[in-house]
């Protein structure tokens, strides 16, 4: 007898996932889509805490198909996800982490949206439980969008609905050589190749759970692996998007989310050898991808730190990091002609250092958050300068170019 193709295959990779796996599986069992419309493909990646046995017991009692694969530990989430994808039969696939859980109507709503719009990727609203979740892309439900005209580039986790035929047609798989950031590479390629993307913002489809033991996979990995991840994502973007504003807008993501944290508060605590090594790893990336098209899209302190990384100025970077750690607020400085507002972070207009003024130039939205503006021209107020800045900057942007709203994924 021919078994009907399920609408969606839920792929779960599990490694040492107890007791979180129990609630994860309960959320799958509670799905409103109906047992005849979905299947589960679960891969136990060499767990020693009973995760595999829990999956076997789940499969034995469920009214819908459950395939359980037990294998030796692969060292990361990419292998189990690829194995699950190879065994999936659904029209769509959804990657569910074993310590997270689904909203009861998640699969039904996401499949309906993909079918209604013919889109290849659907993002369902994510809510954090004991951890932060991405927020900037959930302001409105979008039936059909793309990575260039929305904020979805700031959520590159794999927990999304993907049309399986689309993944197969383009051979999109998780890179098993990466120990972290593999989902960002997979999802960005899907975004760039997709014939339409949908955003379901009016219902929480996914609960991103922070583990009390701190062993969530996104927190693991040495700093060198973060540079590997940044290098891979930047390379993918450069290979798939021609040079120009659209590439620059996407490059903000790896610079801001992957690379910049290596030069934040932790940098001040690193020993000299680690600092030197971080600068060595960053140098080719900065030389290849950091330029005037990317820099203005960041906040001043972010731009300043990356500028100093590009210039290989570890001593000056430490000054900036210590200033940020002190929770001090940079003073706003109004230019003489009133057309620009600068944020006076460390070494602003220090002739001995020579950091260009443009690095400290604030956009209106950022300038409004700062006080103590030192006016340098009679009759001009900071508010007036900000309005002038808004006109100048808006004239530089192309229509439909969204502002940056960072997230944690």
Image (tube, rainbow, N blue to C red):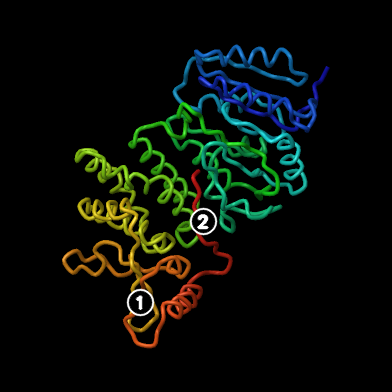
Label placed on residue 334: 1
With respect to residue 254, does 1 lie above or below?
above
Residue 24 seen anywhere in this rendered image of the structure: yes
Left or right: residue 329 versus residue 23 is: left
Residue 304, position in %: x, y? 32, 59
Residue 246, position in %: x, y? 50, 59
Which quadrant of the figure has residue 140? bottom right
Of the residues under marks 1 and 2, which one precedes in the sequence?
1
Left or right: residue 341 versus residue 168 is: left
Label 1: element kind: strand
| Residue at x 62% of width, y 14% of height | 54
Which quadrant of the figure has residue 12? top right
Residue 310 seen anywhere in this rendered image of the structure: no
Left or right: residue 255 versus residue 274 is: right
Camera-nearest residue between 122 and 257: 257
Left or right: residue 275 versus residue 31 is: left
- What residue did someone put label 2 on? 405
């Amino acid at each position: 007898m021919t078994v009907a193709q399920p609408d969606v295959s839920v792929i779960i990779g599990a490694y040492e996932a107890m007791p979180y796996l129990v609630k994860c599986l309960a959320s799958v069992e509670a799905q409103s889509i109906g047992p005849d419309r979905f299947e589960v493909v679960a891969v136990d990646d060499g767990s020693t805490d009973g995760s595999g046995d829990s999956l076997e017991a789940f499969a034995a009692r469920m009214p819908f198909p459950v395939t359980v694969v037990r294998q030796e530990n692969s060292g990361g989430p990419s292998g189990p996800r690829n194995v699950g994808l190879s065994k999936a039969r659904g029209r769509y696939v959804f990657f569910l982490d074993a310590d997270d859980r689904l909203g009861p109507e998640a699969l039904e709503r996401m499949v309906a949206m993909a079918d209604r719009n013919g889109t290849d990727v659907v993002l369902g609203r994510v809510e954090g439980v004991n951890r932060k979740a991405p927020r900037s892309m959930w302001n409105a439900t979008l039936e059909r969008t793309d990575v260039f005209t929305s904020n979805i580039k700031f959520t590159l986790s794999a927990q999304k609905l993907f049309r399986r035929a689309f993944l197969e047609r383009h051979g999109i798989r998780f890179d098993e050589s990466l120990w972290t950031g593999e989902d960002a590479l997979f999802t960005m390629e899907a975004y760039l190749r997709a014939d339409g993307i949908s955003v379901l913002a009016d219902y929480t489809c996914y609960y991103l759970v922070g583990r009390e033991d701190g062993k969530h996979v996104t927190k693991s990995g040495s700093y060198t692996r973060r540079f590997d991840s940044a290098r891979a994502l930047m390379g993918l973007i450069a290979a798939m998007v021609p040079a120009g504003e659209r590439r620059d807008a996407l490059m903000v993501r790896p610079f801001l989310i992957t690379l910049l944290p290596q030069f934040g508060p932790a940098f001040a605590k690193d020993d000299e050898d680690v600092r030197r090594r971080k600068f060595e790893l960053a140098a080719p990336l900065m030389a290849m991808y950091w330029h005037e098209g990317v820099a203005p899209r960041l906040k001043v302190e972010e731009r300043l730190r990356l500028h100093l990384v590009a210039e290989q100025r570890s001593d000056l970077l430490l000054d900036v990091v210590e200033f940020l750690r002190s929770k001090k607020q940079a003073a706003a400085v109004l230019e003489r002609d009133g057309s620009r507002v600068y944020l006076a972070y460390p070494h602003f207009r220090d002739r001995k250092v020579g950091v260009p003024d443009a690095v400290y130039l604030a956009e209106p939205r950022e300038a409004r958050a700062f006080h103590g503006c030192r006016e340098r021209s009679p009759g001009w107020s900071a508010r007036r300068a900000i309005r002038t800045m808004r006109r100048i900057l808006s004239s530089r942007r192309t229509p439909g170019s969204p502002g940056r709203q960072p997230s944690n994924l």
